[in-house]
Amino acid sequence: MIKYIRIELDKIKKKNCTCIMLAIVSVITILGIYFYYSINVSNKTLGISVNPFSYDGVPGIIEVLYRGVMIIIGGQLLNRAIIDEYEKGTINIPFTCGVNKVKFLVSKIILVWLSILAATILGQVISIIVSSFIAVSFNFASASLMFSELKECIVMTIYNDLCFSFIAFIPLYVGMVKKSTKALTGFSIVIFLVTTTGYEQDYLKMFSIGIPAIPLIIGIIGIVSIILSVRRGIKI
């Protein structure tokens, strides 16, 4: 399995991926700074009290932005790694050399999943730290970060990142059935629109710390989609 993952890693154009990720981080960080400023202005103008450092403030908004971006990027990674080869009919070439079909497909999926998870977490950390630092330095945020809010941000971010890292795999089964990169991309956009509304933060709360259940449900659906996709890939 590790051997197959290394082979897939060698195919990745690391320089291009780094440049794309840096561009995404820069844009979302700038948006984060704007959101700090916007919330601060709203608090003063409307007389409301929203702590921009809480999960309901800027960190939560930044997480939703990264989630949406990584759903689209994850779809494109799956297109390049798997669906594109089915479309071109080149997926079976390695199998003629005795390559294990299941391990081959799973290694591609693991690599995409790790890429999505790592990029999401790293990007969020950079954007939140930089935007928060600038907001405090230039007095964009009048509130202060409390330990309880920090704990909530960390718990919710880790929980949501783990669950939503499987979202990008929900369209994979559609792409496998249709053998079409366009079908996968189209369904990724649908998933993006459905899962970036923030509704999952408000319903089906579970555990004593009030973690929402919908991200977990969606994550399980993503895992089921992976299993069905691998089974479909073996039969094709």
Image (cartoon, grey):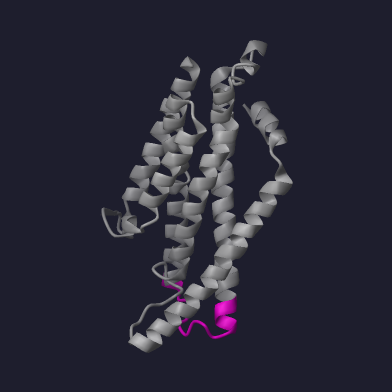
Question: Horizontally, is 166 left or right of 25 in the view?
Answer: left
Task: Identify the residue shown where x is 51% and y is 33%.
Answer: 181
Residue 166 lies, with reference to residue 4, above or below; the image says below
- Tell me the quadrant of the picture where the N terminus can be found: top right
Task: Identify the residue shown where x is 51% and y is 56%.
Answer: 66
Q: Position of residue 226 (x, y in %)?
A: 45, 31
Q: Which image quarter: residue 129?
A: bottom right
Residue nearest the viewer, comparing 195 with 185: 185
Q: Position of residue 27 (x, y in %)?
A: 58, 64
Residue 166 seen from this side: no
Residue 169 lies, with reference to residue 66, above or below; the image says above
Residue 16 seen from this side: yes
Q: Position of residue 86 (x, y in %)?
A: 55, 23
Q: Position of residue 120 (x, y in %)?
A: 54, 53
Task: Identify the residue shown where x is 65% and y is 52%.
Answer: 20
Q: Which residue of the protein is positioned furthest toward the left in this rendering?
A: 204
Count how many numbered circles sit on residues in the image: 0
What secondary structure characterizes most of the magenta part?
A: loop
Question: Horizontally, is 190 left or right of 129 in the view?
Answer: left
Residue nearest the viewer, comparing 208 with 159: 159
Task: Identify the residue shown where x is 62% and y is 15%.
Answer: 95
Question: Horizontally, is 51 left or right of 5 in the view?
Answer: left
Asked whether residue 33 is drawn in magenta, I would say no
Question: Horizontally, is 8 left or right of 83 in the view?
Answer: right
The residue segment tinted magenta is 134-148
Asked whether residue 136 is drawn in magenta, I would say yes
Q: Which image quarter: residue 12?
A: top right
Residue 230 lies, with reference to residue 168, above or below; the image says above
